[in-house]
Image (spheres, rainbow, N blue to C red):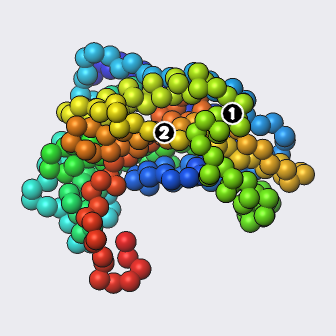
Amino acid sequence: MQKTVIRTKEVIKVAAVSVLSIGIFSAAFTGFNRLTFEAATSAAEPLPVVAAPAVIISAPQVYEAPELTVVASPFMNQHENNTLSPHAMPMEEAAQIGAEYIWDLFGECIDGMEVEMLFAAWPSQSRTYWMGTVGSGADDERFRFMIDAITGMRIDITAVLPQPEMSREEMDLIRQRRSAEDWQAWAEAWYYKTNYERVEYLGLTMNDVEPYLQAARQYAERHFNNTTVMPETERFSLHVNRTANINIGEASATFGGIVFWIEDNTGREIVISIINGGYLANIGSQHNDFIPGFRYEREGIG
């Protein structure tokens, strides 16, 4: 099958610096948690202060269903929460919906790739899910997605970003810096800043941030493919990079991207995270599905 592939800009060339998200952040899909750590550098070279223009990838008008190798997760049917419901759509159909989800949001064709699928029916959730992990093997994950197992509604999607390799010395420095009083004081002060104060603190203007907001609005429209986005519900916050110099223990702060919240006409909210440079990291909406007041019977679960 001949395929048209539009590749995302080389996924985040960040070797030793990543996003520390401070403030209220609600990314439901666990993949984005891999971004929320601080990294150490061996040279004092902070990221550029000025925000790069956000990038929106234009998918072609005609979508071709890719040829996929679809496999069941080894955890399938191993627990009551992962026992396939007879009401769920077939695994292969769910994988194809996920492939189009990836195409629409990242402009990437996953033709020829392997998709590992897992069914989830957590008692704390108001719906069941199909979750997919895309790549050519366990060490080459590229995307993760989650859809409603019955309707195929888009729930969450994540680009799996490369993580820096850090030595024990670097990890020890991170732990020391995170527990230091000045670091904690900085984090608390950042938390209480308004968005406009944060923009000014980072040496930016709203003109620098606006391309990210525009990108987030377009991503929201792509995610809500069967409903209508409600612009009046949008709000945003800023990511900040906190980096530590391993030689002298100093820290700096630079712009890391935005977190953007918006709802559709049904009242469903999504959280969009876009990293400095305009790269979409995550869209999450699973937080809408938690059953209010739900409590697990056994302690320590959920």
Q: Secondary structure at mark 1?
A: helix
Q: Nearer the viewer, residue 193 or 72?
A: 193
Disc 1 versus disc 2: distance between alpha carbons? 15 Å
Q: Nearer the viewer, residue 160 or 134?
A: 160
Mark 1 or mark 2: name the one nearer the start of the chain.
1
The percent position of residue 160, horizontal first and vertical second, equals 49, 43
Residue annotated with mark 2: 236
Label 2: few (<14), some (14–19) or many (≥20) C-alpha neighbours in 10 Å: some
Q: Does residue 231 appear in the picture of this structure? A: yes
Q: Nearer the viewer, residue 184 or 160?
A: 184
Q: Amino acid at mark 1?
A: Glu
- At 81% from the left and 36% from the top, the residue drawn is 45
Quarter of the image containing the N terminus? top left
Q: Amino acid at mark 2?
A: Phe
The percent position of residue 10, horizontal first and vertical second, equals 56, 28
Q: Residue 26, relative to residue 92: is it above or below?
A: below
The percent position of residue 230, horizontal first and vertical second, equals 29, 33
- At 65% from the left and 39% from the top, the residue drawn is 197
The percent position of residue 192, horizontal first and vertical second, equals 62, 51
- At 72% from the left and 30% from the top, the residue drawn is 203
Question: Relative to residue 150, is residue 192 drawn left or right?
Answer: right
Residue annotated with mark 1: 200
